[in-house]
């Protein structure tokens, strides 16, 4: 599975959009981009995933560049409860055991 | 559905003791996983299972054993506990491989200290 690079930490003002970048320059054509987050001391929580098209759900939007070498997770109106570690993971979706390889992620601090 | 449940929540072990961390899921998921998370680090995969009776090693399997006799349960056994096994342990499960989504559902974790 491709390796990802994320900034170690970011701040965001409450109510503003939080944009979390992820570089995955060695991603293969059949690898998906997944985002999970981990609120302090809890188990990780799935947020969103995508292959090459932009995706949106009730939690966030995922923007993937045309060359697929990077992506951005967008939390449109960050709240204090969005303070967490955000993990960007790339992996194949089929012919795989479902394993996730977690890096160190980005610690997002939402400030009032 | 309760989702993924783990017991105990906390445990302190002495060096050389053994214990079993319990994990149960009620979502009829075939895939189950054990991760450990050391302070300030991401999760590392210990063992995983793609169905009852089938298990395989992850990134950091040494010092651990698993079994999967039912779809619901995936216990993790620590033999001869060492201080290096002090960590938070998370169990997870996911839908069948036929799905493209592979969303993993995580339990609340077990915080283990070995002294």
Image (cartoon, coloured by chain):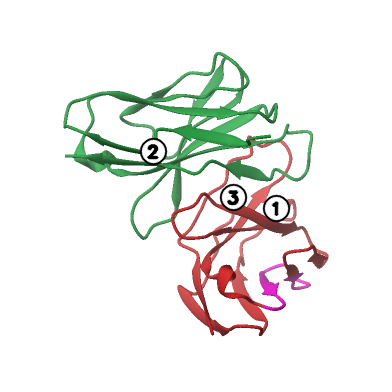
Chain colours: A red, B green
Q: Which residue is mark 2?
A: B60
Would you place residue B115 above or below residue B75 in this image? below
What is the x, y in percent for residue A75?
Answer: 68, 73
Q: Which residues are magenta?
A: A63-77
Residue B78 visible: no
Expressed as whole percent of the image width and height from the top left, the position of residue A44 reads 55, 52
Q: Earlier in the sequence, mark 1 or mark 3?
A: 3
Residue depicted at 31% across the width and 24% down the height: B19
Please say whether residue A64 is one of the residues in the magenta stretch: yes
Name which quarter of the figure residue B20 lies in: top left
Alpha-carbon distance for marks 1 and 3? 8 Å
In this view, the mark in front (2 or 3): 2
Residue under numbered circle 1: A31
Chain for mark 1?
A
The residue to which callout 3 is attached is A1
Q: Position of residue B102 (x, y in %)?
A: 70, 43
């Amino acid at each position: 599975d491709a390796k990802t690079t994320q900034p170690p930490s970011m701040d965001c003002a409450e109510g503003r959009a939080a944009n979390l970048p992820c570089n995955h320059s060695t991603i293969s054509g059949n690898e998906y981009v997944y985002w999970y987050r981990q609120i302090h001391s809890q188990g990780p929580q799935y947020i969103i995933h995508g292959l090459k098209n932009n995706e949106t759900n009730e939690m966030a939007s995922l923007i993937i560049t045309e060359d697929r070498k990077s992506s951005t997770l967008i939390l449109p109106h960050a709240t204090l409860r969005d303070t967490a570690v955000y993990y960007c993971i790339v992996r194949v979706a089929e012919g795989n055991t479902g394993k996730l390889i977690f890096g160190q992620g980005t610690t997002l601090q939402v400030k009032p | 559905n309760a989702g993924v449940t783990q017991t105990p929540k906390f445990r302190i072990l002495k060096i050389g003791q053994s214990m079993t961390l319990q994990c149960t899921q009620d979502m009829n998921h075939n895939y189950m996983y054990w991760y450990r998370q050391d302070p300030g680090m991401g999760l590392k995969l210990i063992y995983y299972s793609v169905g009852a009776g089938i298990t395989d090693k992850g990134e950091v399997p040494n010092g651990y054993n698993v079994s999967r006799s039912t779809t619901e349960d995936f216990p993790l056994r620590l033999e001869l506990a060492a201080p290096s096994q002090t960590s938070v342990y998370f169990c997870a499960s996911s839908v069948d491989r036929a799905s493209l989504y592979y969303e993993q559902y995580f339990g609340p974790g077990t915080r283990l200290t070995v002294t």
